Amino acid sequence: MRGLGHSATHSAVTPPSARLLRSFLIAGFVVATGMLPLADPRSTAVQAQSVTGRILAPTRSQLGWLELQAPMPMLVTNFACPSYPADVAAVPGVPFGIASIVQAFAGHGALGGDLLSIDLQSGAVSPFLGRPSEAESLDVPAIWPDGHGVLYERSNLSAALSVPGQAVPQYSRIEQVSFDGSNPTVIIEDGRYPAPGPDGSQLVFVRATATGLALFTYAIGDGSETMIVPPRPFLALSYARFSPDGQRIAFATISLLTPAGRSH
C-alpha cells in the first residue's frame, strides 16, 4: 500500500494474471498497490460490506464462496467450458449476485461478457442483461449499496483507444440498470471499472486517455468528476473500492516494468 504523495517504487516482479487478480477483487475485498484518502469525505450510514468470514468470487472457472479460514471453496455454479465467470458483485441484504459471464455470443459467436443473476441460496443462474452483438462485452458489475440498481461497463471491442502500456486497449462506457434488468442508462460516456461509494453519492472509475490510465470519482448529484490519480502509462489500473467509511479508496495497479538488461 502507498499513500497519496508518496513516491512510487517499481520492483521486477511478474504481473499477476487478470483472472487471478479478479478472484481477489470481489465484493469490497481488494488486493491493491494504492490507498488514497479522499478530500472532504462524507459521513456514511450504509456499510458497503459486512464481515461474514467469506467472499463470493470466481474460482476454478465457477463462482464459489471462499471461506477465509478454509482451504477449499464451496462452488455455487456449474458452468460448462468455455463459459466462465470473470467478475461478480454482491452486497448484504440482496439475495442474489450479478456476475459477468464470458461466453460465446448466441452460442456460437465471439466470446464476451453477459450479465447473469445468481441466486445466492440455490445457486440458480438466470439471464440478467445480454450484449446485443459480439462486438460488445458487459463486464465488471457493481451493486449499489442500497440495492436500487446495478452498475457495469459496456465495452465496444471494435473501437480501440491507444493507451501507453496497454496491449489490447478498448473503449468502454459505464451504464446503470434497474434490478429487473430494465431501463439501461449511460452514466459516464468514457469510463471503466465502476464502483459505488458506501453512501450512494458517488462512484469511482477508471478512464483511459492518450497519456495513460487515470482514476476519477463521479458525483451522482451534479455529474461532476474529480481526478484522484493523474494519467500514467500503467499496464493496469483497476478495481478501485471505497473503504466502508467512504474516506479512502483502494485500487490495483501494475506499473510499467523495466525489461531485463535495460535501464530506465
Image (cartoon, rainbow, N blue to C red):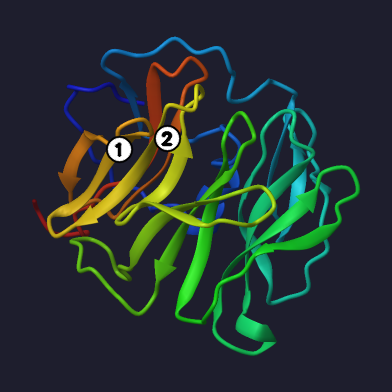
Seen from the viewer's position, the closer of residues 21 and 16 is 21
- The answer to whether any part of residue 253 appears in the image is no
Determine which residue is flagged by label 2.
32
Q: Does 66 sit above or below residue 113?
A: above
Q: Residues within 10 Å of mark 2 (few under 14, many from 20)?
A: many
The part of the image, by quadrant, that contains residue 54 is top right
Instruction: Name the residue at the front extreme.
Output: 183
Query: Is residue 154 left or right of 124 when viewed as pictured?
Result: left
The residue at 81%/59% (across/down) is 125
Mark nearest the camera among 1 and 2 is 1
The part of the image, by quadrant, that contains residue 204 is top left
The residue at 34%/14% (across/down) is 41
Query: Is residue 83 left or right of 25 when viewed as pictured?
Result: right
Amino acid type, callout 1: Gly
Q: Does 77 sit above or below residue 160?
A: above
Q: x%, y% of residue 252?
A: 39, 40
Instruction: Name the residue at the left extreme.
Output: 264
Q: x%, y% of residue 156?
A: 39, 72
Q: Does 7 sit above or below residue 177?
A: above
Determine which residue is flagged by label 1.
223
Q: Secondary structure at mark 2?
A: loop
Give how far apart the Cα atoms at labels 1 and 2 are: 27 Å
Amino acid type, callout 2: Ala
Q: Residues within 10 Å of mark 1 (few under 14, many from 20)?
A: few
Query: Is residue 197 left or right of 263 when viewed as pictured?
Result: right
Mark 1 or mark 2: name the one nearer the start of the chain: 2
Q: x%, y% of residue 68?
A: 72, 30
Seen from the viewer's position, the closer of residues 50 and 34 is 50
- The answer to whether any part of residue 91 appears in the image is yes
Q: x%, y% of residue 191?
A: 33, 53
Q: Secondary structure at mark 1?
A: loop
Q: Which mark is residue 11?
A: none
